[in-house]
Amino acid sequence: MEITISNSYDLSGLAADWMELESRADGGFFLSWRWMGSWLRATRTTPLLVKAQDGNRTMALGLLNPVRRRRHFLSVSQLCLHETGRAECDAVMIEHNNFLMDRAAQPVLLTEILRALQSAHPAWDEIVLGGVSSASLGALEAAGLKVETDRLSPDFAVDLSQNWEGTLSANQRAQLRQSRALAERSGPLKLEPAAGTAQALDFFGKLAGLHTAYWQKRGRPGAFASEFSRGFHRELISAADGPAKVELLELAAGPEILGYLYNFQHGGRVYNYQSGFSYSQDNRHRPGLVAHAMAITRAKENGMRIYDFLAGDAHYKARLGQQMDTLVWCRGQRDRPLLVAERFARKLAGRLRSS
């Protein structure tokens, strides 16, 4: 296996290579060229390209942005996998992150890549892996890196091979019936996808407005507060690279618009990325519950296997789905004296707080 690291590549050539490997991988939407190409265009970064080849066959690809970060008394050199190291850009939240790998690749390939990075690029102190599966932590340790975990998040999803409503509690089924009946007072319920890019962008603008208003009432900016975030998603919605799909769904009850879902599709999996709803003062009015129930049914009818709520412990995710994985935001640290000292200081501070 030959593993190379380069900062010299042509974007159109990379797109072709990435989509060819994507056809042989099980990477999911966030590792699709639709996401990656949109991310590169929106951030205007030129990351390092990591490529693993077995003869003429590409087995893995990944993009690493070098970043210099000041942390307490340290200046740390990082390599960020499919992130920029800039908070505003990384707030779009890549999940199910990893190197894109041929589905026939050996499980040790990630460890081999991490070892090669230590030999070929000696200047970095830690590699930043955001939104990776908990299974990736073993590869970091096997490569001789010390794992520092910054955040853990459950990933709840619905297995569409099951009778979904049958997995709900009696109380949850009653709430769903009540919410549907209340909404239907305005007319028949419909969950309709945008018909083309222009309408998808229109739906996105309305979704972002509802989403932002909801979160600002709670003193938080929401997912679409920055111009970068809105621009990135307009780019993502307008892109047409590869088999991955973006879907904007509008929920209506007769003439009344109740809200929107922003979903991704790839490889038999639907990813619910964000939403925006019009809420009333009546707490029996649950447009989100109705929209997800209809979207889950729609996904199953369209032959999808999983309806993924993505990272987060929001109450509705746990109620409607089951935990499929734990996503991790972590750093793999090399054996640097200052990093060892930082870990010791952190442990000592923890002991002092608990004593």
Image (spheres, grey):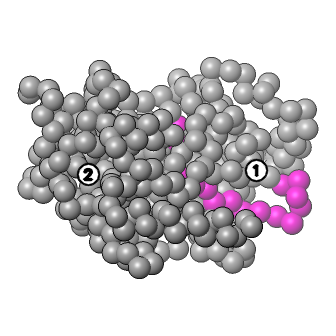
Which image quarter is the C terminus in? bottom right
Q: Earlier in the sequence, mark 2 or mark 1?
A: 2
Residue at the disc numbered 2: 63
Using the image, determine if residue 139 lies above or below residue 273: above
Using the image, determine if residue 306 lies above or below residue 5: above
Which image quarter is the N terminus in? top left
Residue drawn 48% across and 55% down?
A: 148
In terms of secondary structure, where does tag 2 sit?
strand
Residue 170 % position (x, y): 90, 32
The answer to whether marks 2 and 1 mark residues whose Cβ atoms lie closer than 8 Å is no
Q: CA distance from mark 2 to mark 1?
A: 34 Å
Residue at the disc numbered 1: 315
Residue drawn 29% across and 72% down?
A: 68
The magenta stretch spans residue 318: no
Label 2 CA crowd tier, 10 Å (few <14, some 14–19, many 20+): many
Looking at the picture, tell me which residue is in the foreground, 298 or 184.
298
Tell me if 186 is positioned left or right of 220 in this view.
Answer: right
Per the rendered image, the range of residues in magenta is 270-285
Residue drawn 35% across and 26% down?
A: 107
In terms of secondary structure, where does tag 1 sit?
helix
